[in-house]
């Protein structure tokens, strides 16, 4: 750990982390805690993943309850309306659950159920197809990744690392988001500015 009041690195020791975390950056900062997913592990003859948080205040790791009845392993974390959220994704659909009251299992609600079959497609140039396969494996690109809610209530989604779309829950339609100079392959990181 390195903090602003003590700019030296401190080790909390291996014993403080009884979990095997995914090898990627924390995907969600909620309630002063960074959140990760554990690697898939065998649990009662099925595979499971847990949500683990690191409290920046007391510097302890804790398990956070998952949505009840959801046994799937194919999900990622995000933050929607300042709440911890999980997005269960496949090549056909995207289900978004939001924890309305932090650390209360019963407060998980399914907020969105989005069919991804109508997402606008982008055809890669032939010379990029092999590069895309290598890049996708290295960068661990998901079929769909929920990024954030826009001010208009639409859900911003990165689809297969090639398309950025806005989903309108009212109409059920996607709109492709294009910006000048946008590369054909990309990864997106959501950043909220702060004066703190």
Image: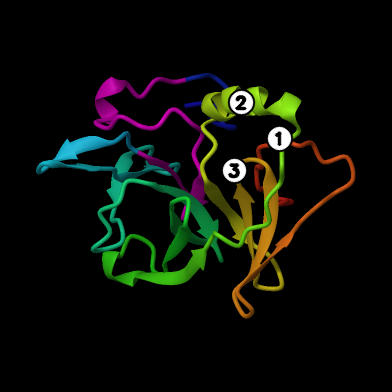
* 2 or 1: tag closer to the N-terminus: 2
* 1 or 3: tag closer to the N-terminus: 3
Compared with residue 181, is residue 134 higher up or lower down, i.e. above or below? Answer: above
Question: CA separation, marks 2 and 3?
Answer: 11 Å
Q: Is residue 112 left or right of residue 49?
A: right
Residue range in magenta is 10-37
Report x, y in % for residue 180. 90, 45
Residue 160, disc: 3
Q: Residues within 10 Å of mark 2 (few under 14, many from 20)?
A: some
Task: Give SS at disc 2.
Answer: helix
Report x, y in % for residue 179. 85, 49
Q: Are marks 2 and 1 in contact (CB under 8 Å)?
A: yes
| Secondary structure, magenta segment, majority class | loop
Report x, y in % for residue 6. 55, 26
Choose top left, top right, bottom left or bottom right for residue 103: bottom left
Question: CA separation, marks 2 and 1?
Answer: 8 Å
Asked if one can make out residue 11 in the rendered structure from this viewpoint, the answer is yes
Q: Which residue is mark 1?
A: 185
Q: Residue furthest right?
A: 180
Report x, y in % for residue 28. 50, 48
Q: Is residue 31 left or right of residue 186?
A: left
Q: Which residue is mark 2?
A: 135
């Amino acid at each position: 750990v390195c903090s602003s009041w003590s700019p030296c690195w401190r080790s909390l020791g291996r014993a403080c982390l009884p979990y095997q975390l995914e090898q990627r950056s924390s995907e969600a900062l909620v309630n002063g805690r960074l959140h990760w997913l554990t690697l898939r592990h065998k649990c009662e003859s099925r595979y499971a993943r847990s949500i683990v948080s690191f409290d920046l205040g007391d510097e302890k790791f804790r398990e956070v309850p998952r949505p009840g009845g959801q046994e799937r392993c194919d999900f990622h974390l995000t933050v929607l309306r300042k709440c911890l959220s999980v997005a269960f994704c496949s090549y056909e659909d995207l289900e978004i659950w939001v924890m309305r009251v932090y650390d209360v299992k019963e407060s998980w609600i399914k907020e969105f159920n989005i069919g991804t079959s109508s997402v606008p497609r982008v055809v890669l140039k032939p010379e990029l197809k092999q590069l895309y396969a290598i890049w996708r494996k290295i960068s661990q690109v998901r079929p769909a990744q929920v990024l954030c809610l826009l001010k208009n209530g639409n859900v911003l989604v990165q689809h297969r690392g090639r398309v950025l779309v806005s989903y309108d829950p009212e109409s059920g339609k996607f709109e492709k988001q294009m910006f000048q100079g946008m590369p054909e392959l990309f990864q997106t990181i959501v950043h909220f500015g702060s004066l703190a």
